[in-house]
Amino acid sequence: MMASTAQASKIPSRVALFLAFLKIGLLGFGGVAAWVRRIVVEERHWLGDREFSELLGIANVLPGANTVNMAILLGDRYRGLTGALAALTGLLAMPLTILLGVASLYDHFATMPALNNALSGAAAATAGLIIGTATKILRSIWPDAHVLPIASVVFLAIGYFRFPFAPTIACLVPISLAATVLLSRRKA
Amino acid sequence: MSEALKQIAVTCAEASLLAIGGATATLPEIQRQFVDLHHLLDFSTFVRLIAVGQVTPGPNCIVISLLGWQIAGFPGFIVATIAFLLPSSLLAFAAGRVLARYAQHAGLVILRKALAPIAVGLLFATGAILAGEAWHGSMSLVITGSMILVTSFTKINPLWGIGSGALLGWITGF
């Protein structure tokens, strides 16, 4: 597998983990998971798309912020506890600092229509970034027969019908598991 | 003061373990605790702080630190951050260790394979919801659509697209 060779040849240092997640924290505006893929898969080649989607799946079903979970899982995977701390500190350092600055300026700028229009434009582009990222991952894992139907159902349930997250996922995880088992048996 | 800090710690730690699907999913419960039950914040302040969180880069969960700051200053900021991060992070750490230890176990291989399409479906859903929230007429569609194509088929740095989106939004005023 390409992903595993890429992983074997590139085990990031703690500093590299810190810097990668520092960048993710700074750039991730509205859609941090898309930036995690951009930096971890495309820029640093630490993971392939298949491994990334599996790890993101785990981060999604665990409680807590998804990106925080990704930082913990990736940091620990490469450098143990201190690696997890390095990634987590990197992820939160800048956003928390900026947050306090923005909080004191926000009231002043919130009423400026030009700024709101620019932010809406940036949000529209970020939505495209997230959907494009999902498309890219889908292209590399869709040959697994359960992928397309399960991903579609999740999308419709959460994105279109807006069902509450936890019960929906609690129903869909067993269904996806059953589909995966059935299809892997049929192949074997 | 210390009563407020204690309340911040309890509410944020609970939210941490309830936050399945990200921090945003727990905001209604946090609002119930801080605004309705314990009157630590009024509703309009709560809404304003959530908006601040949305225009700040980084994971959405940082807004919870901001709520702590508003209630109890810097100690509140620290307590809220740690209380929200620690429980779920310990759980993720333990889960990661178990998953790594039994990585080749057939059951876990299947579990990981089963979770991957759920993650992808959720990404599509997040993108669609964000596109809906950012909707300002047909220009939004142009920006989102172009960004989908650029991201799907090129490796161009997404900052160009987000910058162009902001510029288009500013110039056209939708």
Image (tube, coloured by chain):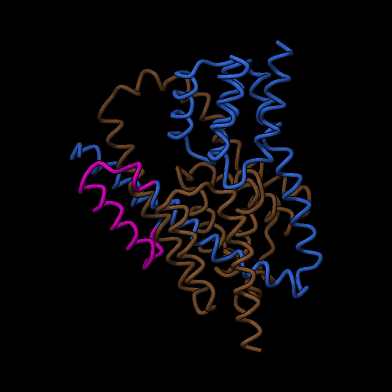
In the depicted view, which residue is nearer to us: B26 or B156? Answer: B26
Marks counted in the figure total 0
Task: Give the x, y percent position of residue A61.
Answer: 63, 54
Please tell me whether residue B133 belongs to the stretch shown in magenta: yes
Horizontal side, residue B166 vs residue B157: left or right: left
Residue visible at 71% across and 44% down? B89
Residue visible at 33% across and 37% down? A119
Residue A16 seen in this snapshot = no
Task: Give the x, y percent position of residue A117.
Answer: 27, 35
Horizontal side, residue B52 vs residue B145: left or right: right
Magenta segment range? B130-156
User: Residue placed farthest to the top in the image?
Assistant: B1
Please tell me whether residue A23 belongs to the stretch shown in magenta: no
Chain with blue colouring: B
Compared with B60, A177 (above or below) is below
User: Residue placed farthest to the left in the image?
Assistant: B172
Using the rendered view, name the quadrant where residue A184 is placed.
Answer: bottom right
In the depicted view, which residue is nearer to us: B28 or B58? Answer: B28
The C terminus of chain A appears in which quarter of the rendering? bottom right
The N terminus of chain A appears in which quarter of the rendering? bottom right
Compared with A64, B68 (above or below) is above
Compared with B5, A80 (above or below) is below
Compared with B86, A125 (above or below) is below
Task: Give the x, y percent position of residue A60.
Answer: 60, 53
Residue A108 seen in this snapshot = yes
Task: Give the x, y percent position of residue B24.
Answer: 53, 39
Using the rendered view, name the quadrant where residue B51 is placed.
Answer: top left
Chain with brown colouring: A
